[in-house]
Amino acid sequence: MKLKKIFPLFIAILALMTSCTDEETMTLLDEIQVSSSYVSIPVDGGSTTISVTAKDSWTVEKVTTAQDSVKWLTISSISGNAGESELTFSAESTLDGRTAQVLIQSGGQTQRINIIQGLSTVEPATCAEVIAGPDGKTFLVTGVCTAITNTVYGNWYLEDETGSIYIYGTLDAKGQTKNFLSWGLEVGDEVTVQGPKTTYGSTVELVDVTVIKINKSLVKVDSVANAVLPLEGGEFIAYLTCKGQGVSVDIPEDAKSWLSISSIESAGEQVVVKFHAIANNGGDRSTTIIFRTTDGSKTYSTETTLSQTGAIIDASIAQFLEAPVGDTQYRLAGVITSIANDTYGNLYLRDFSDETFVYGIQDYAQLGLKEGDIITIVGKRAEYQGNPQVGGAVLESSIPVTPITIAEVLTKPDDPDTYYMVTGEITSIANETYGNLYLSDNGSEIYLYGCYPGYGATGDDRKYLIANEGIVVGDILTVIATKGSYNGVDQLSNGIYFSHVSAK
């Protein structure tokens, strides 16, 4: 009897062992069978093929996540008919190992195929190693959050002792986007994140990172008073909570000439730091103040920003372009030469010295501006991917410019404050230095007394447009000017060059 009981048990164990072995090569369902439910693709790229046997038609789909859309995996077919078919999985080479799942569905049953390419391991790295590393590689990096630029998607800066990188997108604990605030991350916190590297322009980024760990800072700024100081200076106050061993304050070297610490007061964990700023005789200025503490073995930090209103600097566009990126306010005047976005006011502005891009003007849609108008704006020297531009622009004043024919100009009264845009053929040039010439259009002719390189030109800056632009008789010239007269003869006065078309 014992032998009879043991023998069936042995047969059952043998059958179980056989089924486990077969699982590596053949997975059996009633409606669909595959030669392997595990597919390995070489890390250097390649293809692997399995066979599919189905009683009915079948479909294939990838299992995607917020972290991985599985675009890297190519499948030879997304559907098939009853019978035996081949299914090929392909992928390009990868810097890191990666995995995916594919579902084959037929007759109400689902077969999972597990895809693996290389070994999915991520080594810890410094910011410097991330910066030097290749795009597409996944990095695990630890650093301090130094600034947060977007609290919806989770865009922020991470810094360690070797450098700084930009975090472009932070997933929440469930791997979803647009939920950054759920982490409660603050400037000064130490964070460990993992994500793929990309380079956008000159900015090194980790994209849609997964948060591994947050080590809360022992010092933080609770609030500030007088974050924007007036032109004449004054007192700035920072209120801190510090759970470490005292507080040290770092004022950047370029701000020490105008900003100083007047007092530091502590009561338990509450710290009040007061600063004094002197009067500002230049443009707008700002600085970032860093507060540090320690637990005896590790240093923690947080920061806050202080700005001070300054004088607005009147500048030519050439001077503006030479200025550094910053908060200084510049007053620029010129002609709108083209409009890239008529909703926000992204446009090009030109004066006698140069041309610059204006990245939007406040309330532009309500201003009624158009190409050719003369405007005065105030804005900051900004930059995008190495290209200079005006940021945060506000319109101060505008002079409308009306397109008009020469015949229509001749009917207008003299008025030094009304500007017209006139186009005509150059019939003769009386003075090449200042651009005195005759324009003709459909039988009407008028004398242009001066054609200058751009708005705002004075003195020698008014000279030599004709030679510098290679303008000759027969060219079609478009000019902005006022209607005037000399000894009773009508003329266009103080012309501003807009464009020309060569007759050649």
Image: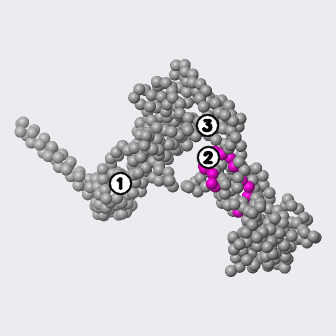
The foreground one among 54 and 221 is 221
- Numbered disc in front, either 3 or 1: 3
**Would you call the spot at circle 2 few (<14 residues within 10 Å), some (14-19), or many (20 or more)?**
some
Task: Write down the region rendered in magenta.
Answer: 321-337
Q: Quadrant of residue 405?
A: bottom right
- Residue at which label 1 appears: 95
- Secondary structure under the numbered disc 3 in the rendered image: loop
- Residue at which label 2 appears: 326
- Numbered disc in front, either 2 or 1: 2
The numbered disc on residue 299 is none
- Secondary structure under the numbered disc 2 in the rendered image: loop
CA–CA distance between discs 3 and 1?
49 Å
On the rendered image, what quadrant is the C terminus found in?
Answer: bottom right
Q: Residue at x 55, y 43 (%)?
A: 149
Circle 1: residue type: Leu
CA–CA distance between discs 2 and 3?
17 Å
Where's residue 221, x and y in %? 55, 30
